[in-house]
Amino acid sequence: MRRKLVAANWKMNGSRAANAAWLTEFRAQRSPCETVVCAPFVYLPQLAEALAGSETAVGAQDVSEREPGAFTGDVAAEMLLDVGCRWVIIGHSERRALHGESDELVAAKTARAHAAGLRPIVCVGETLAERDGGHTLQVVARQVAAVLARCGVAALEAGAIAYEPVWAIGTGRTATPAQAQQVHAAIRAQIARVDAAAAARTRILYGGSVKPANAAELFAQPDIDGGLIGGASLIARDFLTICAAAR
Ligand code: 13P
């Protein structure tokens, strides 16, 4: 049985004061499922300190594919671990679209993160044009295949995959539970062709306009093992409600 996992992706939001208020509200209740909070690099030490000893882990939103060295502006996996970060989002569609991250770069970052001991949350998902063109499963399979080819199943089993249809991110337009389930099942079947036991243990999260009102029906799908939450995670109460739906 896979334990549900719900991760907050704050994206480029937060301030020391706002984070402190969020943490106070969040820690007042016990999260009913496994949780991760992914924040901008500069706030990771603040979160790690505040959440130390709790069941909630801290995650970054990107990591370098390289080992420490002369790479101005980059952050190595070792540095994330050093400040108490245990997870990292890799290949978010905003990074693929705005920073030109290729399937190969996403795979390289996943390999590096996993080798260093971080748990990767690898994001995949199709654009609206790709969905309308009938290419959803093909696009997602290509993105997953790049990671499997480079890292095998171990990195995904240690971390998670997040299916985030680009057209559902920040748009208020959620994939229906049936639409999401179809893609999640296809991803699991693809992993199962490499290692069936590992596929059964790998968590596949859904992301894209998850809200307190729609979380429960998404998480009730057999292959949806939790969520990656953007906008709704900025409000601690809403994030806790979503976590409760994953119980
Ligand atoms: P929203 O929940 O704001 O749609 O964002 C989803 C997402 O991109 C999480 O990584």
Image: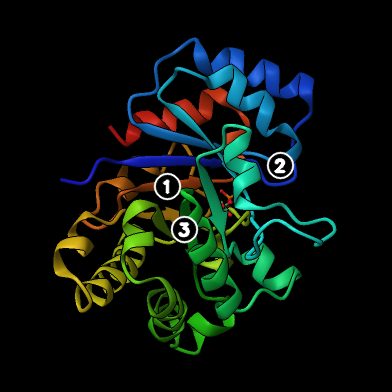
Secondary structure beneath disc 1? strand
The image shows residue 99 at horizontal and vertical percentages of 75, 70
**Relative horizontal placement of residue 187, taking residue 21 as reference (left or right):** left
Image quadrant where residue 6 sits: top left
Amino acid of disc 1: Gly
Check whether the beta carbons of the residues at disc 2 and disc 1 lie within 8 A of each other.
no
Mark 3 to mark 1 CA distance (whole Å): 24 Å
Outermost residue to the front = 69
The image shows residue 59 at horizontal and vertical percentages of 56, 41
Give me the disc on residue 40.
2
Give me the disc on residue 115.
3
- The residue that label 1 is drawn on is 227
Secondary structure beneath disc 2? loop
The image shows residue 64 at horizontal and vertical percentages of 66, 60
Task: Residue at 49% x, 80% y: name it.
Answer: 131
Of the residues under marks 2 and 1, which one precedes in the sequence? 2
Task: Residue at 27% x, 32% y: name it.
Answer: 247
Check whether the beta carbons of the residues at disc 3 and disc 2 lie within 8 A of each other.
no
The image shows residue 151 at horizontal and vertical percentages of 41, 71
Check whether the beta carbons of the residues at disc 3 and disc 1 lie within 8 A of each other.
no
**Figure quadrant of the N terminus:** top left
